[in-house]
Image (cartoon, helix red, strand yellow):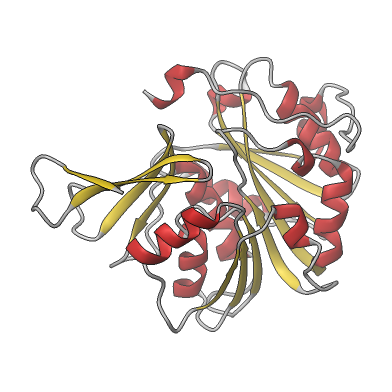
Amino acid sequence: MARKKQRGREASAEIVVEAVAGGLAELIPDRDRPRAWTLVIDGAPQSHVDLDDPALLTFEYQRRLGHVIDLVAPAGRPVRAVHLGGGALTLARYIATTRPRSTQQVVEVDAPLVQLVRDRLPLDPNARIRVRSADAREGLGKVPDDWADLVIADVFSGARTPAHLTSTEFLAEVRRVLRPGGHYAANLADGPPLAHLRGQIATAATVFPELALAADPTVLRGRRFGNAVLFACDLPLPVAELTRRIAGDPHPGRVEHGKALADFTGGAAAVTDVTARPSPVPPPSVFR
């Protein structure tokens, strides 16, 4: 493992560089927060964690997922959550802080990354977070029926969502583990012409009756590559409150739902295991 100092920081605050299964991982110290770090893998920023303030969400898409977490149950009530993709465990830490006594399962395929995060960004020992090193779909298959209040999918391999996590069969497994009224949230990435994103909405619509999508307006208009967060449930979503919160973020987003979201799909076909493909490769400019 190699380390290198970041200018303007104390010697103890160094960039940590280590090879993991998914590539070269870097933990880069935050210049403004003494115990905050950004996880980068092969040049792609993955997560930001502040060990002194785990409720702080700085990445745009993570803030949107945080709004969903805030709205799945009354404030402070414990929930059962499954995280597909772990990264630096930012959202698991957020739930443990904002909803104490929650029970959480994290499925992360990259075992060396899990160990790096455990060593360098240790979890609160009182948090009820179980981390399992396994493929996301395999790990999901081991969760009991009707167990979870919330399933969050944030899985990227080489900055792309694997194909087997984009299908109706995968989402049927998600719905199996959700209790009635449980919520699903997924971080998706796409750019012009938004074929992947449209297909993912069409796919989710075959499994969940209620959907909403949040993203930067320029992403929704197909003008640039970026993240979009898909929300799904078998009961009506709190669309008005989600819209208010997401519009008030430092990087305001737009929420689409109902007929507008159905129109957005443009007749895209649902994805099955047979037709599934990974999400598109981000252009190099995204991470500059």
In percent of width and height, residue 105 lies at 63, 69
As rendered, which of 4 and 225 lies closer to the eye? 4
Indicate the quadrant containing the C terminus: top left, top right, bottom left or bottom right: top left
User: Is residue 192 shown to the viewer in this render?
Assistant: yes
Q: Where in the figure is residue 66, as x and y percent of width and height? A: 52, 57
Residue occupying image coordinates x 88% and y 29%: 275
* Nearest to the observer: residue 94 or residue 279: 279
Point out the residue furthest to the front here. Answer: 1
Q: Nearer the viewer, residue 257 or 6?
A: 6
**Residue 192, above or below 237:** above
Q: Is residue 116 above or below residue 23?
A: below
- Quarter of the rendering containing residue 75: bottom right
Q: Position of residue 24 (x, y in %)?
A: 42, 39
Q: Is residue 76 left or right of 11 when viewed as pictured?
A: right
* Residue at 65% from the left image edge and 68% from the top image edge: 81
Count of number-bearing discs: 0
Residue 201 percent across, percent down from the top left: 78, 36
- Mark yes or no: residue 234 visible: no
Q: Quadrant of residue 82?
A: bottom right
**Residue drawn at (13%, 57%), measured in percent from left and top?**
12
Q: Residue at x 48, y 50 (%)?
A: 63
- Would you place residue 40 above or below residue 86 in this image? above
Q: Does residue 175 sit above or below 149 in this rendering?
A: above
- Left or right, 58 with reference to 246: left
Judged left or right of residue 82, residue 57 is left
Q: Nearer the viewer, residue 274 or 36?
A: 274
